[in-house]
Amino acid sequence: MTNSVHILYFAWLREKIGTTDEALAVPDDVASVRDLMAWLARRSPGHAAAFENAACVRCAIDQDFVSADAAIASAREIAFFPPVTGG
């Protein structure tokens, strides 16, 4: 069984991947944000480039900021974006 999730990409991640969002069936063994980034990086050269330095990627699950260790099992929407700076 797989978990279907809506994944959003912002800023340079969107540019590297070439799309703003995807609806994907995520395998059950992809349990955390970190696992998801690694799995996504294997999908295409653009995904690999976007997640090359995962430490520079921030994530939100269902519009709440989370760490790379956060579980994705019940997620409906996962968003990836670069670090946000204020000014």
Image (cartoon, rainbow, N blue to C red):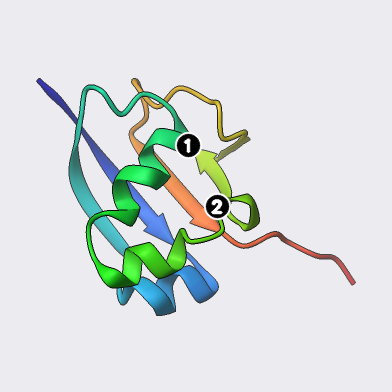
Q: Mark 2–mark 1 contact, CB under 8 Å?
A: yes
Mark number, residue 54: 2
Q: Which amino acid, mark 1?
A: Arg
Compared with residue 64, is residue 49 higher up or lower down, i.e. above or below?
below
Quarter of the figure with residue 77 = top left
| Residue visible at 19% across and 46% down in the picture | 24
Which callout, 2 or 1, points at the residue further toward the start of the chain? Answer: 1
Compared with residue 4, is residue 15 higher up or lower down, i.e. above or below?
below
Mark 2, secondary structure of its residue: helix
Mark 1, secondary structure of its residue: helix
| Residue visible at 43% across and 28% down in the picture | 32
Q: Which residue is mark 1?
A: 34
Comparing 51 with 12, the one in front is 51
Quarter of the figure with residue 50 = bottom left
Whether residue 85 appears in this view of the structure is: yes
| Residue visible at 30% across and 29% down in the picture | 30
View extreme (right): residue: 87
